[in-house]
Amino acid sequence: MTYYFRRVYINNKYSLLSSTKYNPIVKDNVDKSMHNYYLNQKTIELAESKYQEYSIQGLLLKSGLVSKNIDLLISGDLQNQILASTLASSKVNIPTLGIYSACATFVEGLCIGSMFLENNKGKIIVTTSSHNLVSEKQFRFPVEYGSIKKRVNTCTATGSVSALLTNKKSNIRIESATIGKVVQTNHMDANDMGSAMAPSCAEVIYKHLYETNRDASYYDLILTGDLGEFGLKITLEYLRRKYKMSFNNVIDSGSIFYKDENIYAGGSGPICLPLVLFDYIIPLKKYKKILIVATGSLHSPLSSNLKIPMPGISHAISLEVDY
Amino acid sequence: MFLKQFLHYIYKLVKNNNGEIMDNNEYDKLVKSIVKSENPIKNILIAFISGGVMGVIGEMITRISLNYFEITKSDAYFITFAILVFVASLLTGLGFFDKLLSIFKCGLIVPSTGFANTMTSSAMDTRSEGFIKGIGASIFKLTGSIILYGVIFGLIFGLIRGVLL
């Protein structure tokens, strides 16, 4: 289902990049960049919640607001029972909705926030965070365990991104949103998340273009989430085979995230797409109509052990940017 | 405007998509054609050499301890095992072992160094959750299966050896 919005704008953003390993492409443009996995906290889980707290407070400071001006905080992360978001929101004193759709969390937050703002007046903060070591521990193996990485593995980005949504006019307008379905194939390999997410990504791109009656060339850029280099190829091939559509304006934020040549297929994590969008694509001042398609793989260690094929989900949002 | 919407409606009716995804087998083929499985020969060669080197090191420690201390051969093997596990655990704690492993591959996983790495890394990960529910509960999270099936198959093969040979 595609929803259209008339008066929803992204007014401001704050991005915090906490790991500069492998030289991320957004390093020079983010609001704050550092290389610190602990932030003086006892554990990495608490450090992630601190990232989120810093990014919310940084956004409030940057846009000259205080926490009582904000009507709603929508937040999510990759930890068990979204612990980092819960802890961060307990510090900032704003009414909170916690959401989870793995790496599509940020765009899901934008969808919910836009629907809220279309019919109400208000200010909403959408925030998300991810931590490389936490997700290694959560989804893969212990941090210091020497598992052999495959070429399809992705490396989770570390940091936090917050965005302020209001009705006040600004240069980034949210035009429409398409909410995707959970798609499950036979794919089982938890190392290769790109192949699990690719069908849902292709389906939501097709569905968005079909429901809005647009061509692929309507958009200057289609920015997908964290498919990785193989996932992007699979998505394009899927669209070509099933729907006979070909695209030449698709960029995957996961594949371009790390500048250094490394052993991975790219970056991942819920902050990957918003970081690339806000701190690489928009500063380029090149693309006016952007379709962002966030992709998430909804597997868990339990589902992998139970031999359940990996479900994938994607949400698309169409942005109109004025420079 | 109205005409455009009407045409779009007709277009939707004609080109109806009921949201079925690609056939699973077809999708598997598509994935296989793009995600090429990596060539294992290089890794096997590296593991062959590094595993051999590990074996030589272990044998050296055994010989040295046999020569310098007056102990039996089984005690010398025990000392070798202890030294290898200690060094691997120490390197894991200092954060070097996973980097070494990405270079030397299975040559370091298959010997007791891999076992030590797995155990130490699980313990380090859960240190923050406390000594009982953290380290105590999770130290054998990954290595528990090695111990369990090691004991079971040890018993089975011991029996076979005792009865048949």
Image (cartoon, coloured by chain):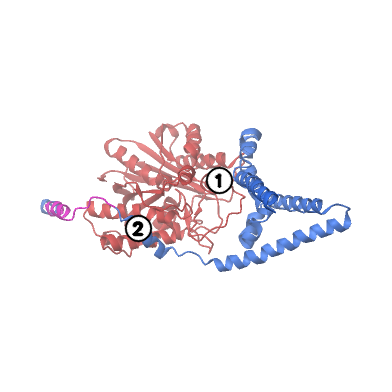
Quarter of the view holding residue B145: top right
- Asked if the magenta segment contains residue B79, the reply would be no
Query: Which residue does the image show at 25% across and 55% down from the upper left?
Result: A209
Q: Amino acid at mark 1?
A: Lys
Compared to residue A58, the image places residue A96 above or below, namely above
Left or right: B149 as drawn, with respect to A254: right
Q: In the image, residue B159 lies at what x, y percent?
A: 67, 47
* Closest to the observer, B156 or A302: B156
Q: Colour of chain A?
A: red
Residue A122 appears in the figure? yes
Query: Which residue does the image show at 52% across and 44% down from the upper left?
Result: A138
Spot the residue most to the front: B164
Badge 2 marks a residue whose secondary structure is helix
Residue neighbourhood size for the residue with mark 1, other residues' Cα within 10 Å, grouped as few (<14), some (14–19), many (≥20): some
**Number of marks present in the image shown:** 2
| Residue that numbered label 2 is attached to | B25
Q: In the image, residue A4 lies at what x, y percent?
A: 25, 46
Host chain of mark 1: A
Q: Colour of chain B?
A: blue
Spot the residue most to the left: B3
Real-space Cα separation, disc 1 to disc 2, in angstroms = 32 Å
Q: In the image, residue B6 lies at what x, y percent?
A: 12, 51
Q: In the image, residue A297 lies at what x, y percent?
A: 42, 49
Q: Which residues are magenta?
A: B6-20
Query: Which residue does the image show at 18% across and 56% down from the upper left?
Result: B15
Question: The C terminus of chain A is located in which quarter?
Answer: bottom left
Badge 1 marks a residue whose secondary structure is helix
Picture disc at residue A137: 1
Host chain of mark 2: B
* Closest to the observer, A269 or A52: A269
